[in-house]
Image (cartoon, rainbow, N blue to C red):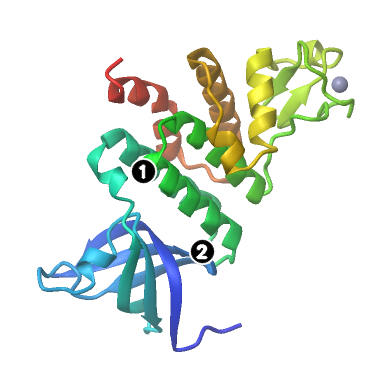
Amino acid sequence: MPRPRVYRTEAVVLRQQDYGEADRILTLLTPGGKRTVLARGIRRPTSRRAGHLGLFHRAEVMLAQGRQLDIVTQAESLDAHEGLWHDLLRFTYASYAAELVDLFLPEEEENPAVYDLLTLALEAFASEDDLRLWARYFELSLLQLAGFHPEFFQCVNCGATIEPGPNRFDVTQGGLLCPRCGPEVAGARTVSLGTQKVLRYLASHDREAIAQLGIRDATHREMEELLHAFLQYTLERELKSTAFLRRLRSELSMYEKGRGA
Ligand SMILES: [Zn+2]
């Protein structure tokens, strides 16, 4: 359906790029999909829109169809996610989430669930304590919404119900292997019981339940390694974004630096 000439929508600023003297090109995520738009004059100190359309802001915007890009005519910030701007680690996790959404979601593809997930993730990265937990929840949920969800409940080789035990994870088949199949698959990695339990929990509980979880550092490291190996495999196959993959590989070292460990 063609968009009306002028329309109002909620949006999150995923990406921004200066353009010309005082303009900015913004990549917005809206419930109706990703849009690249032009914000004219937004870099002028007198711009009334400037404080409303910063990076990662959630805002109500009015857009008018332009010849090439739609143009922002009004903007009102709903949530600036203040917490992201006083802590480099929080900011970096928000950048990670925005970049992952940008990679997984094709331009203009309507996906209100991805919009809701990103707004939840930005709120969590701005305010929650355990950022790694919310990063893993975000990754798993986004993979699910994009149709690449890893399987933790049935063996991806034989279909047997996964019981707690010496199961392994296979990135190429995208899930756990039962103790009979695991040793037969080259490259399948062993996964501790604690990590298996948390991954199954994250895949099947809501935000309130997940916020109560306390996760040991060793489990965090293992989950991160496993999910990043899976994301890397999926992205290399689907998207081939090597710049992003380099960032993915550096999350752990970033986290340790950020926490002054
Ligand atoms: Zn099996």
- The percent position of residue 54, horizontal first and vertical second, equals 27, 59
Disc 1 marks a residue whose amino acid type is Ala
**Side of 233 relative to 241 (left or right):** right
- Respond yes or no on whether mark 2 lies under 8 Å from ligand 1: no
Observer-nearest of 156 and 212: 212
Disc sitting over residue 126 in the figure:
1
From mark 2 to mark 1, how far is it between C-alphas?
26 Å
**Side of 47 relative to 31 (left or right):** left
- The percent position of residue 155, horizontal first and vertical second, equals 83, 26
Residue at the disc numbered 2: 107
Q: Is residue 221 above or below residue 116?
A: above
Residue visible at 34% across and 38% down in the picture: 90
Q: Look at the numbered disc 1 and give the secondary structure of its residue.
A: helix
**Front tag of 2 and 1:** 1
Which numbered disc, 2 or 1, marks the residue that appears first in the sequence?
A: 2
**Circles 2, 1 touching at the beta carbon (< 8 Å):** no
For label 2, the crowd category at 10 Å Cα-Cα, with few meaning under 14, some 14 to 19 and many 20 or more, is some
* Res 251 seen here: yes
- Respond yes or no on whether mark 1 lies under 8 Å from ligand 1: no
* Res 20 seen here: no
Q: Look at the numbered disc 2 and give the secondary structure of its residue.
A: loop
Q: Is residue 51 above or below residue 219?
A: below
Residue visible at 22% across and 64% down in the picture: 51
Give the quarter of the image for residue 193. Answer: top right
Quarter occupied by the C terminus: top left
Disc 2 marks a residue whose amino acid type is Glu
Which residue is situated farthest in the bottom direction here? Answer: 5
- The percent position of residue 62, horizontal first and vertical second, equals 38, 79
Quarter occupied by the N terminus: bottom right
- The percent position of residue 25, horizontal first and vertical second, equals 30, 66
Residue visible at 61% across and 37% down in the picture: 209
